Amino acid sequence: METNHLRLNEQIATAMEMVANTAGFLWNKGWAERNGGNLSINLTMLVSQPFPPFTTSYETELSEAAPLLANNLLYITATGSRMREVARDPFARGCFIQFNDTGSNCTIVAPSGLLPSSELPTHILIQQFLKSQGNGYTSVLHTHPTELIALSHCRPFLNQKYLSDILLGMMPEARMFVPKGIGLVPYQKPGTVLLARATISALVNHDVVLWEKHGVLAVGTNVEECFDSIDILNKSAQIFLSARQAGYVADGLTGNQLNNTAPP
Ligand code: 2HA
Ligand code: ZN
């Protein structure tokens, strides 16, 4: 079925505008080759207008119940969708997922032939985790930022504290806007529950996590905020690597300089 009737809900339409903008940023950054990356938003709190009924749709039982998502409504990009296509029309390249009143199964509405992202189990588990934290975070963004991935191919940087210190030392904004630094998730096969669980452990103390030799996942109050956090840390990685390419090692901000850089 088509999702045209959902376009009539103003709050959903506004949320989808931000999805479209963010997907465009990811494509323009070169972080979204082919169908790279995916994102989800918990729309439940955003949509106070009555949600149009799901007339033609399909139900699916979840392998693991998500009780904290009972009666919640999620948007997730569809499997195989290109971010450049999501940028043109998020309704045409995404799925809406309505959980039942126990969170044991869900109804999916999507344009015909579309299925949710292969990372759906990861998104459901993380969305549940965000709910349990009660921090108002609704959004999960996974993408492939080149320079951060490059650093994850070098063993010395696969140390959370060491890497975070380097990245937060490259410019004051990194410390100001991503004060928790970056969490590290050792390599796991994409789309697996193991990857989801390791990601959740790293999200306890971070809003941005680096998946070794794969990509980055960020959480936040909206997808543009997730994008901004990743963009800042990737800029730090670019500065660090540019200095290396020029033949020197970047000094990084001194302890004093960092102490004068309080988060806003
Ligand atoms: O959605 O990036 O990790 C495609 C991916 C899976
Ligand atoms: Zn990926």
Image (tube, rainbow, N blue to C red):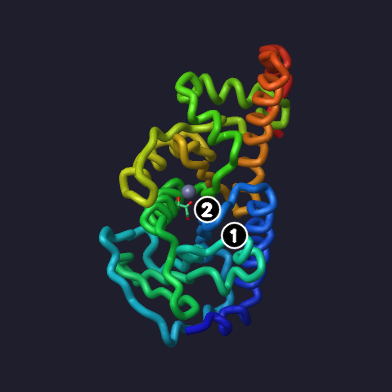
The residue pinned by badge 2 equals 36
Instruction: Determine if the C-beta at disc 2 is less than 8 A from ligand 1.
Output: yes
Q: Residue at x 44, y 70 (%)?
A: 97
Answer whether labels 1 and 2 touch (C-beta < 8 Å).
Answer: yes
Residue farthest to the bottom? Answer: 55
Label 1 – label 2 distance at C-alpha = 8 Å
Q: Amino acid at mark 2?
A: Gly
Q: Residue type at mark 1: give it.
A: Met
- Which residue was labeled with disc 1? 83
Task: Locate residue 66 relative to residue 212 in the image: left or right.
Answer: left
User: Which quadrant would the C terminus be assigned to in this image?
Assistant: top right
Q: Quadrant of residue 120?
A: bottom left
- The quarter of the picture where residue 113 lies is bottom left
Percent of width and height locating residue 3: 53, 80
| x then y, percent, for residue 191 | 37, 52
The first of marks 1 and 2 along the sequence is: 2
Most foreground residue, 31 or 3 = 31
